């Protein structure tokens, strides 16, 4: 998920949130959903039935709002005009592990 995130940031000219731990927690959640559910379902939403949501595909990352309008509910992919946008366009696996552990 880290490689996907870095590639998507580059391809969409978006940036990470200025607080990198937010990105780390989101990436960890996406990775866990990919392992558990077979798809990177948005970890920032509540679902009555996660398996149904995965099949629907609307909230699989990148979700439809991100693909169509560049709006990321999770604050993982931010446009430069977003008040929370940072200047960082990459994150490492080590950063994801370290920052998501600190956020517990």
Image: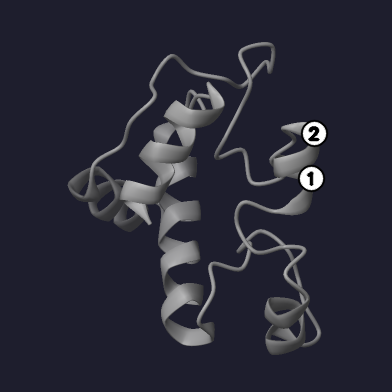
Nearer to the camera, 21 or 70: 70
Circle 1 sits in a helix, a strand or a loop, which is it?
A: helix
Above or below residue 71? Residue 84 is above
Dot label at residue 65: 1
Look at the image and tell me in which quarter the N terminus lies: bottom left
Q: Is residue 51 left or right of residue 85?
A: right
Badge 1 density bin: few <14, some 14–19, many ≥20, Cα 10 Å: some
| Residue 21 makes an appearance in the image | no
Secondary structure under the numbered disc 2 in the rendered image: helix
Residue designated by label 2: 69
Residue at figure coordinates x 38%, y 21% from the top left: 88
**Image quadrant in which the C terminus is located:** bottom left
Q: CA distance from mark 2 to mark 1?
A: 5 Å
The x and y percentages for residue 77 are: 57, 35
**Left or right, 8 with reference to 55:** left
Quarter-wise, where is residue 31 in the image? Answer: bottom left
Residue 46, quarter of picture: bottom right
| Residue beneath the point at 70% across and 83% down | 50
Mark 2 is surrounded, within 10 Å at the Cα level, by few (under 14), some (14 to 19) or many (20 or more) other residues, namely few
Please tell me which residue lies in front, 20 or 61: 61
């Amino acid at each position: 998920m880290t490689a996907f995130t870095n590639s998507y940031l580059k391809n969409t000219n978006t940036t990470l949130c200025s607080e990198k731990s937010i990105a780390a927690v989101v990436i960890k959640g996406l990775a866990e959903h990919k392992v558990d559910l077979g798809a990177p379902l948005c970890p920032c939403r509540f679902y009555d039935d996660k398996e149904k949501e995965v099949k629907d595909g609307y909230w699989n990352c990148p979700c439809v709002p991100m693909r169509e309008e560049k709006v990321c509910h999770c604050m993982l992919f931010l446009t430069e005009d977003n008040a929370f946008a940072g200047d960082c366009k990459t994150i490492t696996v080590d950063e994801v592990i370290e920052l998501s552990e600190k956020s517990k």
